[in-house]
């Protein structure tokens, strides 16, 4: 088995057999000696090495092999040609054979013969026509339809610029062998001398326009880098602040300070057994993407990779697991709203010709609440704490609804309908039993609590109380302004000043249902 050597040629790592390596080294030394006296010797040799590396890559890919053999090296040298083939005058017939060999054309922008970006001159080389005809067609497209500008810009972006000597040779379809490189160098040297002697004004203006556009592009690129680094810095600062706040929120939800957060909606939906797991899952779901954004911003701002691929993959796994856990528990909680149950309780009320309806906005505190709010200290005895903040986003959805209907039996009744949901009917019924709602009658004043309380630290399962007040025809009702938002199917349109007693508005029960007193007196006023 032949010895294999690993070499770096044309910035490509190649495995080559030892005898082939010796032949290739001798060949490259000949090339370096031949072009040693030229000004661009390093660039020419580099282009040749890049071309040889490309040919090696084609051989490896075509043969599905891993090692370059001596036969492969000799084949490449035969295609590239030797220095002796064009070094002496006696070998001119051989050189002519190499000159007749044409390579495959590739589309590049020719910035050496450019009026603007080299698109037209590059197309002219590819299509084998003069550049002026392509430029005339481009101008006609611009002035006739206007779409030519967009097409030109797209081609400018899509077509690469011919930078190296090999790319310029491929653009013109010239052979990329030693003879081609040597001839290309001589042509470039002759063209440089001609340009030094005479440079047309239109060429100078074209290069000037190109230089201006290139300068604008460089300035825009620099400005974009500065802007991107500034935005990245802002994201880093805000991201770290958000991550720190997530840590504090996690600690709060785990009960390091208190568990009051779970008294508010929608956290009151979560079962106590699920809280810790869901807290960690929600933390990871939010933490990992923000951390990824911060790490990406660090990379943009400082050009450094802040995390390796293994850790990135680990964070992705953690995030996917957290999402799965969140979906699983969300499905379990949603299943606890499947069944519906109701409890109905009918309570007779003391009859009066006129009732006053109020909403009780006072708050009920137990001993622990009194200690937390420091209400057990002097100065707060016999005082009522009022809470009318029904509209903040973490309040449980309005769960007390009041209807006023005509009593078909002539009796004064209050029908209390307690409703709740649960995983099974029995659980839903138990949730309905855990509803506590306050209703007080003091003489003719009926006071309703605008909210319910849940016994035994029950979770929110869409518990509601529907109250139906049934009174006979002719009963007058004085409704407080604070109770209107709890009434069903009534409009706040009883505004006649003569029937307004402070914050109360007068209504009356008729055969057609409850009516505003002012509306009933309007026909009498019109007669």
Image: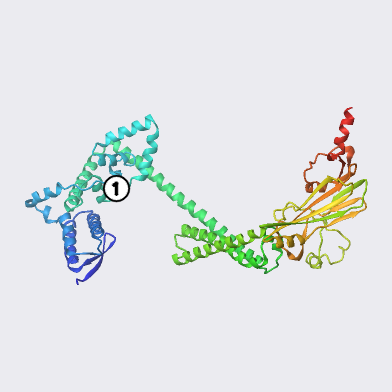
Task: Please state the horizontal and vertical placement of residue 346, each as a whole percent of the image.
Answer: 84, 54
Nearer to me, 358 or 296: 358
Looking at the image, residue 165 lies above or below residue 330: above
SS at circle 1: loop
Task: Please state the horizontal and vertical placement of residue 113, each as a whole percent of the image.
Answer: 28, 41
- The residue where tag 1 is placed is 162
The answer to whether residue 257 is left or right of residue 524 is: left
Q: Quadrant of the C terminus?
A: top right
Nearer to me, 307 or 477: 477
Residue drawn at the location 39% of the way across and 38% of the way down: 150
Q: Residue furthest top?
A: 527
Q: Residues within 10 Å of mark 1 (few under 14, many from 20)?
A: many
The answer to whether residue 347 is left or right of residue 61 is: right
Task: Please state the horizontal and vertical placement of residue 146, each as a whole percent of the image.
Answer: 40, 32
Task: Please state the horizontal and vertical placement of residue 56, each as a whole percent of the image.
Answer: 23, 59
Q: Quadrant of the N terminus?
A: bottom left
The answer to whether residue 230 is left or right of residue 386 is: left
Q: How many marks?
A: 1
Q: Quadrant of residue 129?
A: top left
Q: Residue furthest left?
A: 90
The answer to whether residue 286 is left or right of residue 307 is: right
Q: Quadrant of residue 27?
A: bottom left
Residue 38 in sight here: yes
Residue drawn at the location 67% of the way across and 68% of the way down: 255
Residue 240 in sight here: no
Q: Residue furthest front?
A: 409
Q: Quadrant of residue 425?
A: bottom right
Looking at the image, residue 446 lies above or below residue 125: below
């Amino acid at each position: 088995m032949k010895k294999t050597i690993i070499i770096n040629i044309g910035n490509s790592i190649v495995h080559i057999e030892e005898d082939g390596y010796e032949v290739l080294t001798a060949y490259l030394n000949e090339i370096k000696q031949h072009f040693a006296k030229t000004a661009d010797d390093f660039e020419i040799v580099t282009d040749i090495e890049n071309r040889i590396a490309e040919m090696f890559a084609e051989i490896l890919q075509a043969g599905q092999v891993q090692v370059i053999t001596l036969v492969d090296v000799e084949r490449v040298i035969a295609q590239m040609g030797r220095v002796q083939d064009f070094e002496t005058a006696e070998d001119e017939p051989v050189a002519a054979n190499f000159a007749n060999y044409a390579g495959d054309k590739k589309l590049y922008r020719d910035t050496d013969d450019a009026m603007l970006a080299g698109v037209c001159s590059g197309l002219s080389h590819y299509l084998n026509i003069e550049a002026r005809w392509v430029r005339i067609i481009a101008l006609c497209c611009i002035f006739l339809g206007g779409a030519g500008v967009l097409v030109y810009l797209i081609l400018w972006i899509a077509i690469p610029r011919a930078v190296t000597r090999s790319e310029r040779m491929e653009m013109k379809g010239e052979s990329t062998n030693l003879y081609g490189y040597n001839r290309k160098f001589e042509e470039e040297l002759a063209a440089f001398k001609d340009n030094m002697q005479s440079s047309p004004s239109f060429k100078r203006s074209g290069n000037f326009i190109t230089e201006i556009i290139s300068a604008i592009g460089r300035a825009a690129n620099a400005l974009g880098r500065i802007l991107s680094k500034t935005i990245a810095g802002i994201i880093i600062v805000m991201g770290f602040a958000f991550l720190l706040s997530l840590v504090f929120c996690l600690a709060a939800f785990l009960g390091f300070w208190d568990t009051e957060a779970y008294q508010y909606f929608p956290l009151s939906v979560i079962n106590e057994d699920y809280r810790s797991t869901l807290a960690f899952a929600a933390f990871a779901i939010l933490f990992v993407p923000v951390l990824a954004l911060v790490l990406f911003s660090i990379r943009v701002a400082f050009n450094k990779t802040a995390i390796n691929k293994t850790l990135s993959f680990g964070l992705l796994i953690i995030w996917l697991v957290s999402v799965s856990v969140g979906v699983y528990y969300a499905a379990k909680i949603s299943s606890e709203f499947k069944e519906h149950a109701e409890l109905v309780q009918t309570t007779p009320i003391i009859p009066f010709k006129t009732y006053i309806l109020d909403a009780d906005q006072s708050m009920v505190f137990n001993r622990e609440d009194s200690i937390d709010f420091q209400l057990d200290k002097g100065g707060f005895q016999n005082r009522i704490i009022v809470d009318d903040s029904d509209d903040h986003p973490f309040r449980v959805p309005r769960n007390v609804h009041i209807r006023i209907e005509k009593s078909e039996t002539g009796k004064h009744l209050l029908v209390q309908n307690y409703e709740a949901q649960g995983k099974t009917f029995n659980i839903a019924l138990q949730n309905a039993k855990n509803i506590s709602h306050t209703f007080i009658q003091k003489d003719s004043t009926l006071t309703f609590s605008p909210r319910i309380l849940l016994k035994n630290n029950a979770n929110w399962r869409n518990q509601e109380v529907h109250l139906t007040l049934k009174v006979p025809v002719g009963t007058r009702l004085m409704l407080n302004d604070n109770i209107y938002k709890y009434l069903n199917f009534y409009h706040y349109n009883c505004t006649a000043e003569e029937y307004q007693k402070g914050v109360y508005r007068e209504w009356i029960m008729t055969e057609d249902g409850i009516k505003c007193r002012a509306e009933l007196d309007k026909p009498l006023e019109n007669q």
